Image (cartoon, rainbow, N blue to C red):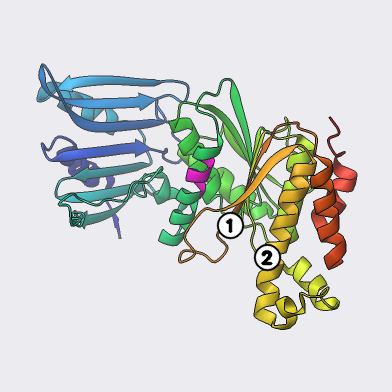
Amino acid sequence: MAEPLDAALTEVRALLLDPALTRAVAAGRRRGQRPSVIRAELRPVTLKAGPRLQISTSDGARPYTRNVAAGSDAAAAVDALLAEPFGNWHVETADATLQLRVTKSGEAQVHRATATRPAATPGGHDREKEYLLDPGDPIFAEIGGSAAKRRQVDAFLRALAATLPDELTGTLRVVDLGCGNAYLTFAAYRYLTGRGLDVELVGVDVREDQRQRNTELAERLGWADRVRFVAGTIADAVVDPAPDLVLALHACDTATDEALARAVRWNARWVLAAPCCHHDVAAQLRARPAPAPYELLTRQGILRERFADVLSDALRAGLLRLHGYRAEVVEFVDSQHTPRNLLIRARQTGTAPTAEQRRDYRELVDQWQVSPRLETLLATDAPVVTG
């Protein structure tokens, strides 16, 4: 139920100045308005001079941190932030959590919860799940997403964190192919900019209504100058300049092949693609008998489907290696959250494939008599690296 915004912000003010405050984040923007900073984070700190309220803000280019004394200084600083037209507030104290979202009509949607303490481990330490992107981050009030989807996105971000080098300079250009509702798009932007990176991100989806929806979200979050969306197929959408990093989360069937092919065509430095269904190879396996002595692998439908998954991703990784990438297939999230939990992670090295790699790939394709969609796409999209 919507509430008057002034009353809700008065409640937020009291929590921000409460000694029990643990953390607060303001982000996003109200309809037709733009805050002077894109994000603000508040937390209590203890310095040699005594307790202070630490306020960290970012204008999108660089962070700025200051520590203000309790009392009138803290109150003035908090009042200045509350006067900014932020679209979301997330406030945590030792006893409660409050999430506030400003609606299009200028009212407040407020969710309040009593704080729960993490369970104690046998060793007496609190056990608390650490996220790369806090599930309570205000962006989730805008972009939504189920708890399962947030876990998938956080797991994907962990794989991304393990892929990128610690030191990156210049602008990092990212594309999210088949972005859908853009949960990963926005979360990746939040995470990467939180690392201090200069990021330009493009989300691609075939549906124009999705492009419009996601563009409006980017505007409300204050990111429209750095996060944009285009409507088009994965194979043909116009993305210029070419990206350094290509993401694809659960692009269905051969859409994953199209995403990988575009990454190779762009000569992207890094690729992370979590495949979804694998109907194409599965249909090819059904159409012809399995080579001896592997008929038992495909006689039962469930085993044939699972083997098609394995064969598809093995061939994809093999093809990426033939095109100058170091590629691996890893599990990026527990299967209890999604059965589609494998990730193809690749890094461009420019290294020419060995004769053994070429032979192993060709023998596997010939033995199973399959025609991988990615091979067909790469035959016209990009030459194999030769040295």
Q: Position of residue 253 (x, y in %)?
A: 71, 62
Magenta residue check for 97: no
Give the residues drawn in magenta, as a range.
156-160
Q: Position of residue 120 (x, y in %)?
A: 18, 55
Q: Disc 2 residue type?
A: Asp
Distance Cα–Cα, label 1 vs label 2: 10 Å
Q: Residue at x 85, y 65 (%)?
A: 367
Q: Disc 1 residue type?
A: Leu
Q: Secondary structure at mark 1?
A: strand
Q: Is residue 290 above or below residue 215?
A: below
Q: Residue at x 48, y 31 (%)?
A: 193
Of residue 64 and residue 228, the one placed in the foreground of this image is: 64
Q: Residue at x 57, y 50 (%)?
A: 213
Query: Which quarter shows the C terminus?
Result: top right
Q: In the rendered image, which quarter is residue 381 located in? A: top right
What residue did someone put label 2 on? 309
Which numbered marker is on residue 55?
Answer: none
Q: Position of residue 372 (x, y in %)?
A: 82, 59
Residue 232 visible = no
Of residue 117 and residue 304, the one placed in the foreground of this image is: 304
What residue did someone put label 1 on? 342
User: Is there a contact, CB below 8 Å, between mark 1 and mark 2?
Assistant: yes
Q: Position of residue 48 (x, y in %)?
A: 11, 17
Q: Is residue 67 above or below residue 234?
A: above
Asked whether, in this view, residue 165 is left or right of residue 235, the answer is left
Asked whether, in this view, residue 334 is left or right of residue 215, the answer is left
Q: Given the current orientation, which residue lies at the most extreme bottom position?
A: 300
Q: Residues within 10 Å of mark 2 (few under 14, many from 20)?
A: many
Magenta residue check for 158: yes
Q: Secondary structure at mark 2?
A: helix
